[in-house]
Image: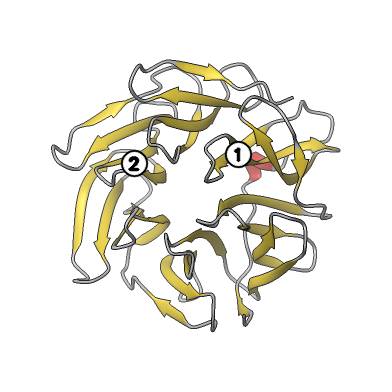
Amino acid sequence: MRRIVLATLTVPLSLALSAQEPAAFHRPVFLPDGETIVVMTNRHDGDWELYSIGIDGSGPRRLTDHVGWDGYADVSPDGRHIVFDRSDDDHSGVVMASLDGEGESWLLESDGASVGGARFAPDGRSVVFTSDESGNRDLYRLWLEDGRRERITDTSQGEGDAVFSPDGSRLAYAVWLDDETSALEILDLTTESVHRVLAVQGRLYGVAWGADGEDLYYNDDSDGDQDIYGVSLATGRARNLTDNDTPDHLPVVSPDGRQVVFTSERNGPEEVFLLDLHTGVQRQLKLR
């Protein structure tokens, strides 16, 4: 597997928490078993690292031990590897690591602009990621076997947060049209046709597919705070799933399609919550 050198990852300032503040959890994602998540947390001396934890709070296991910042992981379809963003004083980019602790390696190492947000294809053979090496945020695909790289978008708008559909035939992603307007789009990877699902007056990000490929989930702050929304691709109707006055972040759907895992600041520092898509019930996971 060849290493690709790209660009510098910019760590969100909102995540640069001091060691004195209470521990927080951010950007959880399910393992294929649906009973375990990988989540980034600053519970260890304020340093953001990745852990795997059962959704019942059992078996916390530290996956990274790195002086710097690790986060925004994705899990391979076979549950054996993760890819994640890393930044420290000397390097930034995307790293792949084995979940059994056998090692890690750079996939995309930076040398100037911003690169990150890698997500696996359903067959595990490639990842999609975002880079602004051209001067604009575009989507790229990296083939893991030979390091071949393909530019997917080349527009004047900014794209990011791309995720493959469950069958791998489409990409859904956020589009940032200007400082106040965002959109949700789908690219058909076979026909290269683009479908704009919706546009909002606000910041749209954190895109996720439903397990059946018929719904999308995302963050939208157009009503004054960050909430999680779902939209049916059949009807185009969007609905607010976590309507409250505090930020809710970055939904990811469980493998069985029944639940959404996300983080919320409703009780102070970010905690992990589960939303039952059938009943609408939300419950906090006890991970501390």
* Front position in the image: 270 or 8: 270
Query: Which quadrant: the C terminus?
Result: top right
Residue 137 location (% of width, % of height): 44, 65
Residue position marked by numbered label 1 in the rendering: 37
Looking at the image, residue 272 lies above or below residue 279: below
Graded by Cα atoms within 10 Å as few (under 14), some (14 to 19) or many (20 or more), the crowding at tag 2 reads many
Question: From the viewer's perspective, is 240 left or right of 282?
Answer: left
In this rendered view, identify the residue nearer to me: 232 or 79: 79
Amino acid type for the residue under numbered disc 1 = Ile
Provide residue 2's location: percent of width, then percent of height: 62, 82
- Number of marks in the rendered image: 2
81 w.r.t. 149: above or below: above
Horizontal side, residue 147 vs residue 140: left or right: right
Q: Is residue 125 left or right of residue 269?
A: left
Q: Secondary structure at mark 2?
A: loop
Q: Judging from the image, what secondary structure is the residue with disc 1 in? A: strand
The reply to whether the C-beta atoms of the residues labelled 2 and 1 are less than 8 Å apart is no
Q: Which mark is residue 210?
A: 2
Q: Earlier in the sequence, mark 2 or mark 1?
A: 1
Distance CA(mark 2)–CA(mark 1): 17 Å
Q: Residue at x 79, y 68 (%)?
A: 90
Q: Name the quadrant of the N terminus.
A: bottom right
Q: Position of residue 145 (x, y in %)?
A: 54, 79
Position of residue 125 in the picture relative to residue 41 (left or right) = left
Report the amino acid beneath label 2.
Gly
Tell which of 272 and 123 is nearer to you. 123
Q: Vertically, is 116 above or below 148?
A: above
